[in-house]
Amino acid sequence: ATSIQAYREMGYLPDAIVNYLVRLGWSHGDQEVFTRDELIERFTLENVGKAAAVFNPDKLLWLNARYIKETSSGRLADLVLPFLIREGLIREDDVLDKEWLSGAIDTLKERSKTLVELSSSLRYYISDYVDYEEKARKKFLTEETLPYLVDLKTALLALDGFSEKELESAFLSIIERNGIKLRDLAQPVRVALTGGTKSPGIFEVIEVVGKERTIKRLERAIETIRKGD
């Protein structure tokens, strides 16, 4: 049997575990998700099942994902810190800006099922250096996309602010000037910033990564293409 501590280390939230274990042998209509106060208020022995309970790890994972989505990003920022340390993304004495980390989590929690997944997804936000997935690099960091990345770097350097509206305007001007579609620019930029082809919305990613690091990552992608690495 897997211990409670093991589930904690796998990134399950305490409230999700409590909810699942209570619901395993007890029911309240069709409701699946309960706050602790709701469990205390509604629990009755009359609704405890007589049949042997069957543990369903997929159901627990689904429930945990629900809790992550519904938990505040500020709370998740506290909960994910030990996992960031464990993965070597930060040291124990590092101090992360909680408001910034919460903003990063805002973009990721809808697609994270555990704190381990969330921590892993935060890598490209926290690390100064991103590793390119080989397939993504070969497909999107090419001579064809090089001028788009150069154009974007120039456009971002010229921006006074760094709001989503300003980013969209910069993207739109490059798209119109080159006669391309959004994905033709967004995917190479996504690879440059995250190393892969799957991420939250590109403007969300750019805002969280920030102007200075976005430009540095674009410069590295441009250099990678020019060197033919």
Image (tube, helix red, strand yellow):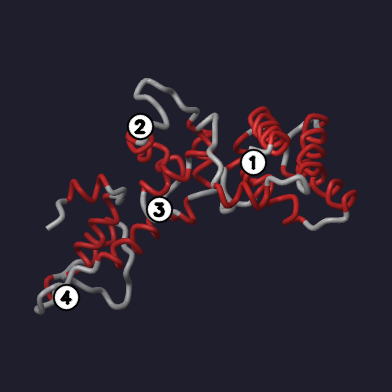
Sequence order check, earlier mark of 4 and 1:
4
Report, in whole angstroms, how far the alpha carbon at label 1 lies from the one at label 2. 25 Å
**Of discs 1 and 2, which sits in the foreground?**
1
Sequence order check, earlier mark of 1 and 3:
3
Q: Which mark is residue 208?
A: none
Report, in whole angstroms, how far the alpha carbon at label 2 lies from the one at label 4. 42 Å
**Of discs 3 and 2, which sits in the foreground?**
2
Compared across the picture, whether 163 is left or right of 179 comes to left
Q: Position of residue 114 (x, y in %)?
A: 36, 52
* Residue type at numbered disc 2: Ile
Residue at 38 percent across and 31 percent down: it is: 88
* Residue type at numbered disc 4: Asn
Label 3, on which residue?
68
* Residue type at numbered disc 1: Ala
**Within-10-Å neighbours for mark 3: few <14, some 14–19, many 20+:** many
Q: Which mark is residue 85?
A: 2
